[in-house]
Amino acid sequence: MTEQVQEPLWSPSERQKAVIEKLRELSELDGVSGAEGPVREWIRAQIEARPPKGSFTIESDPLGNLLVRVGEEKPGPRIMVAAHMDEVGLMITAVEDDGLLRFRPVGGIDPRILPAQVFRIGEKRVPGVVGGKPIHLQKPEEQKKAYRLEELYIDIGAKSRAEAEAVVQVGDFAAFDAPFQVMGEGLVMGKALDDRAGCLMLLELLQEEWPAPFLAAFTVQEEVGLRGAQVAAYRLEPDAALVLEATSCADLPGVRPAGQVTRLGAGPAITFRDRTSISDALLVRLLIREAETAGLPWQWKQGTAGGNDAGAIQTQRGGVRVSSLSLPCRYLHQPGSILSLNDFEHGLELARRGLHAWARELPNGGDGR
Amino acid sequence: MKEIFRKLSEAMGPAGAEEEVRQVLKAELEGVVDRLETDALGNLYAILEPRGGGGGLTVLLDAHMDEIGLVVTYVEEEGFLRVAPIGGVSPQVALGQRVRFLGGAEGSVASDHLDDPKELEMKHLLVDIGASSREEALTRVQVGEAGVFTRPVAEAGEHRLMAKAADDRAGCAVLVEVLKTLKNSPHRVVGVFAVQEEVGLRGAGPAAYRVEPDLAIAIDVTLTGDTPEAPKMAVSLGKGPAIKAMDRSVIAHPAVRRLLADVAREKGIPYQMEVLTRGGTDAGSIHLSRGGVPTGAVSIPCRYVHTPSEMVDLRDMLGARDLLVALLERPIDL
């Protein structure tokens, strides 16, 4: 990875520079589902350096969620805000006699994007490249097909099993090795922006003074089935929850408008329902009202595919009202995901205003109809 | 039973937007039960405190309010709506139906032109609400707005009714009738009218968490095997309520299952045993609540499930009511 930071081709504002730097640090941390430690420690250090206003506690639970409770003694609805720390990646499943590594995806990775990708493996961050049969050895019919997962391996430059096993073990996680980059005006590219962008929004929201209990959950294992959020919501016992996410963006050639989930730069996306949850009508109404009042751009997340932590939170204990705010992200679950800084700012502002509205206006502490 | 079923069936309640059904139930149960409550997800609780000396159990009876439907995902420039399914909707069944959205707009379900009708998928469906532009359409519906198929209840012969959303308004109607009929139950009976069953049994789990029951029984429809060339299934319309042994979401607690069968035999209520190999019920999420709940289910046989013309038999619904009332009016030893 190059340490040299390229100058952007446009002039970011001071605020944008600050966001870019935090996003860079977060994006380049390794945190494949189940191994979110580096992300958790970075976030914990940020909170300790800039603590929330008033009373608060920080805890990490047995699964590795980082939970921050602010102003829990305050009256009013208990509001949880969640962002997941984990990213998609690989797990090493076997070391071959010739020193090559076999692997399986952790979370939703399209195997067709893997050949020639560079990964960092394990806590030692051993570099490796995904290889398959090289093109000049392939038969013509093989060249027309994508590699199957079974045909791929990771090469770490080891000449034997013993040499490989000296630095890598079965069960090690591998994360994309992808430097964060500033791109065209207002756009950035990196790995794991799903959902490190949400983590950064949540960190910023922790600086706000809230009239009601504010329960921040930096969750683990979202990408493998919304697992961390379940226990986080059980622990925090919220009345209402907002999930800060990144979602696919399909404003691309060949996708008909009705199939475009979100459009980059058109504002944060509000979910009405997806595969795992139905957003609470009142929460959504308040978010939209706040966006319209403040003149903030927003868009619907079109379609009902996909899911996020809201699904796991909604059914905890006696039930929780949920809603999601997602930043459009092109090439999700790939090393070169693209995010708009304007969407980030608008999403943050909408979350801030929306959460204040929830804190003031949710009936009976969020309960009852 | 017929009248309350009609009101419930014709109310609109796509999963996640059960308000209209909840209002019908509240009006029906006000003054009948000791207390009505709702929770954050919209589940409705109708609570009957124990009568007589008490000393009974807390019994949760569940029926779900929600029904399948469609949700607007996109509005085409020409004013047509693109939709996604809410719950198990087949595009073949949806095609040609009328749909009514929460805001009141009604439309006809059409599709893109396809050379081969077998290719029909949800993404080809269009709902035509008579708008000639996106702007006009957006004055009447919103992206994210849910809708349901419309169809009034009709009688089919002496005992049978055709209805949309008999799944599970038939169960809701039975539960209302049970709560109205119970006079002397030693048990604390909590009727739960649950939300979001059709999208993954989501409402009933939190409801069970709140109620902390000693015993739970879900009341829902089940499929039948009594139509020509139907897959083999030992449940028929009109032969009485079905006592569930198993479905995809739950294995009925043996004591609950035995208890229901014993009471039915004793009271001379015809019943059938049910093994449902497709689909699940709220019993699936209830029995896993907290440290586990002994749970069973009483099912109303129903033909053409998840179409706008589901068919149920009133005798099965009355049988289910009688069975549950008889069960709850005596002490229960699990």
Image (cartoon, coloured by chain):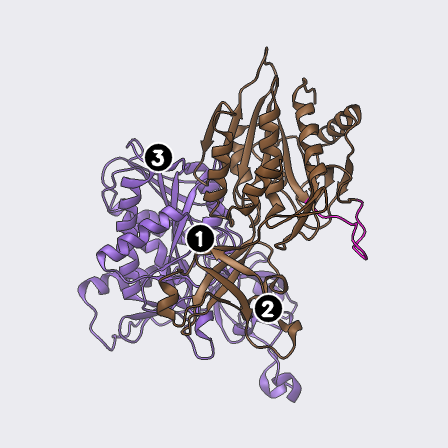
Q: Secondary structure at mark 1?
A: loop
Range shown magenta: B222-234
Assess whether residue B8 is covered by the magenta stretch.
no
For this orientation, the residue located farthest to the top is B53
Dominant secondary structure of the residues highlighted in magenta in the image: loop
Which label sits in the foreground, 3 or 2?
Answer: 2
Specify the colour of chain A.
purple
Q: Which mark is residue B102?
A: 1
The Cα atoms of the two marked residues, 2 and 1, are separated by 24 Å
Q: Are marks 2 and 1 on the same chain?
A: yes
Q: Which residue is mark 2?
A: B121
Left-right relation of B112 to B37: right
Q: Position of residue A248 (x, y in %)?
A: 43, 65
Query: In which quadrant will I find the N terminus of chain A?
Result: bottom left
Q: Is residue B210 visible from the viewing direction of this image?
A: no
Marks 2 and 1: CB-CB under 8 Å?
no
Left-right relation of A249 to B244: left
Out of A306 and B280, give the one closest to the viewer: B280
The Cα atoms of the two marked residues, 3 and 2, are separated by 42 Å
Which chain is painted in brown?
A: B
Q: Which residue is mark 3?
A: A365
Q: Give the mark nearer the N terminus: 2 vs 1.
A: 1
